[in-house]
Amino acid sequence: MKNPALFEPLELGSLTLPNRILMAPLTRARADEGHVPNDMMAQHYSDRASSGLLIAEATMAMEGNCAFVSEPGIYNNDQVAGWKKVTDAVHEKGGRIFLQIWHGGRACHSLLNNGRQPVAPSPIAITNDEVHTPEGKKAYEVPRELDDTELPAIVEGFRKAAGNAKSAGFDGIEIHGANGYLLDSFLRDSANQRSGPYGGSFANRSRLLLEVIDAVTTVWDSDRVGVRISPLNSFNSMRDSDPVGLYTYLAEQLNGRKLAYLHLMRADFLGEQKADIVSPIRATYEGTLITNMGYSAQEADQEISAGHVDAVAFGTPYLANPDLPERFAKGAELNEPNPETFYSPGPTGYNDYPTLNE
């Protein structure tokens, strides 16, 4: 077998993963009207059930925070029923699946949310990209600064979403604290310039994420909850003046919470910020560390063998290779994904990539 370290079982809290090849959360914009998951999505995830763990795409924890056209939600009964089709299909094939829950924050747009202005820790707009809306690409709007008194309702929204994910049959949840969306925008000082209990110090900027974690672990055992972070990613106009200091502080706070894992994006989508963030997080965080971004099978195998990480989540390779673990085991060639169909409607470029047996 090629890449044997990738195929060592991994104890992830109370779950045993058969391999260490995880599917990263990948927004694909295939949900039905009303942000309801559908049969096409059930096929997509169940086709990839040989993954050690599937982490389903960013899913709206509460209504009115849409940042993409046709991303799924988990805030009403129709969405819960749609996701139940997905989890049932994955479990029928012996797979395991977590749901990533999020709030889009300042990456939302009023044209996607019935005129509602996006919200953020500070009134600072995203400037390094545009947002897709029903009227075409638009500049991101200046968000409204959230008042401290509004934050408990957001925490409660995540708690309810966690309960809905349990009702939908997921094996656990991942909290989206990355990529410039709401929780990440509170963490990093390029987006959070507020004063008071949620701004300034590492402790204050980490407060909202930690409150969300503590809320959802009243619904799920902590070993069924993961967190995703992106210390270096400049996507959505994000950066921090001291990413190593901030995220080692956060890792220390997570140690006592006994989570399923910490999911660390090791690099910057845009290549602007470069640093070794894996080593200080590994040295600080005492739980299971999953990393992501740009790994080959060979590098992932080496990093796991060396004890630098416990598992690797693959994103782009999973778009075009539903049987990715089988290909890694055999050292087989990978299908190339077609970027033109990453977010297009319908099954083309979603459910039509061939497996090795086809």
Image (cartoon, rainbow, N blue to C red):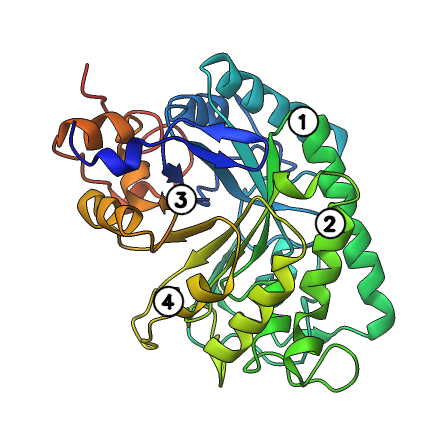
Q: How many marks?
A: 4
Picture quadrant of residue 340: top left
Q: Quadrant of the C terminus?
A: top left
Q: Nearer the viewer, residue 77 or 179?
A: 179
Alpha carbon of mark 3 to alpha carbon of mark 2: how far? 26 Å
Does the rendering let one see residue 239? no
Percent across and percent down for residue 182 are 63, 64
Q: Is residue 280 left or right of residue 8?
A: right
Percent across and percent down for residue 146 are 76, 73
Q: Is residue 223 above or below residue 47?
A: below
Q: Is residue 160 left or right of residue 317?
A: right
Residue that appears at 44% across and 27% down: 45
Q: Nearer the viewer, mark 4 or mark 2?
A: 4
Picture quadrant of residue 336: top left
Q: Nearer the viewer, residue 313 or 134?
A: 313
Residue that appears at 61% across and 58% down: 255
Provide the residue designation for mark 2: 158
Provide the residue designation for mark 1: 168
Of labels 3 and 2, earlier in sequence is 2
Q: Is residue 81 above or below residue 148?
A: above
Q: Nearer the viewer, mark 4 or mark 1?
A: 4
Q: Nearer the viewer, residue 158 or 119?
A: 158
Residue that appears at 12% across and 30% down: 332
Q: Quadrant of the N terminus?
A: top left
- Marks 4 and 2: CB-CB under 8 Å? no
Of labels 3 and 4, earlier in sequence is 4
Q: Which amino acid, by three-letter code, is at mark 4?
A: Ser
Percent across and percent down for residue 217 are 74, 45
Label 3 sits on a secondary structure element that is loop
Label 4 sits on a secondary structure element that is helix
Provide the residue designation for mark 3: 343
Alpha carbon of mark 4 to alpha carbon of mark 1: how far? 36 Å
